[in-house]
Image (cartoon, rainbow, N blue to C red):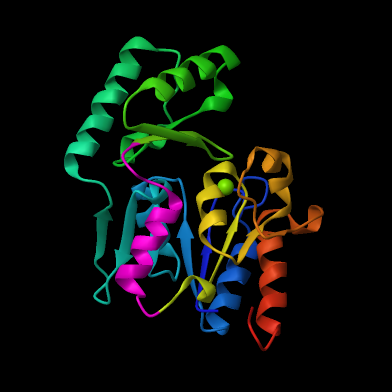
Amino acid sequence: MKIVFSDFDGTLTVNGKLGAVFFKIIELIEKAESELVIVSGRSVSWGHFLLTHFPLKHVIMEGGGVIVTRTKEGVISEEYLVPQETLDYLEATTQEIKKNMPEVILSADSLGRVSDRAVEFGMMDAKAVEKLENYLDQKENIHYSRSNVHINFWAGEISKANGVKTFLEKYMPHLNAEDCIFYGDAANDESMFELFTNTVGVSNIMSILDQLEHKPRIILEGKDNAGAFGVYNHLIELFSQSQGF
Ligand SMILES: [Mg+2]
């Protein structure tokens, strides 16, 4: 297996925290001469943080809206996967929401977001969430999904799968989907469960599994396989098989 794609929140963390097991995963992937590419709904500025502090070459952020890459010279570059006019339309929509729905709580890191915006739906009452989702449903060329931490909305054709497809075409054109695996835990990972054959849901995916039309091929079970522990346990097994998949 050449590339391990993984969601971040709830998949490489455990109970919302980044722990020692994350570093064990990185070590395991390096030893196997594979590469970890995080595919997250977090902002592009989080992507800079991840590339700056961990031994990663590429991350795909904002739910697939941007590929962030560290060059050999150490320079970080960003590639947005929708045109500027689409980004401008998203900003105009965000301003409309702020003006007309003051009860919507945009995430603190929405300031650092370019190709999507995030909403702290857990801090809002159910009626306000419903009102926002109705608005987003009716708005032309605006889409949204739920991660385990946010409702993210964006303009244009953005998904984790589109981000990964573009990434593979551009950076790893010799690879095909069978050379890759994806780990995830939430509804915003669904496009990846559809795109790849090799997909794994960590055990905390159970609570949202019914909402998914496209489910991961393997669903890990038990507390011992929650979040990053599940990824670690599965990778140990995977790398120990000489045939790979
Ligand atoms: Mg997640």
Q: Is residue 152 left or right of residue 230?
A: left
Verify whether residue 163 appears in magenta: yes
The x, y position of residue 81, in whole percent, is: 28, 51
Magenta residues? 155-174
Residue 52 visible somewhere in the drawing: no
- Image coordinates for residue 57, horizontal then vertical, percent: 38, 70
- Looking at the figure, which quarter contains the N terminus? bottom right
- In magenta segment, residue 53: no
Q: Is residue 240 above or below residue 15?
A: below
**Depth check: 239 or 176 in front?**
176
Name the image quarter holding residue 28: bottom right
Tell me which corner region of the image, top left, top right, bottom left or bottom right, holds residue 16. top right
Q: Along the line of sight, which residue is nearer the eye, 107 or 218?
A: 218
| Residue ID at (51%, 76%) | 179
Secondary structure character of the magenta stretch overall: helix
- Percent position of residue 23, x then y: 58, 67
Q: Is residue 97 above or below residue 56?
A: above
Residue at x 55%, y 37% (from the top left corner): 149
* Residue 42 visible in this rendered orientation of the protein: yes
- Left or right relative to 155: residue 19: right
Q: How many marks?
A: 0
- The residue positioned 34% from the left and 44% from the top of the image is 157
126 with respect to 131 (left or right): right
Q: Position of residue 116 (x, y in %)?
A: 35, 38
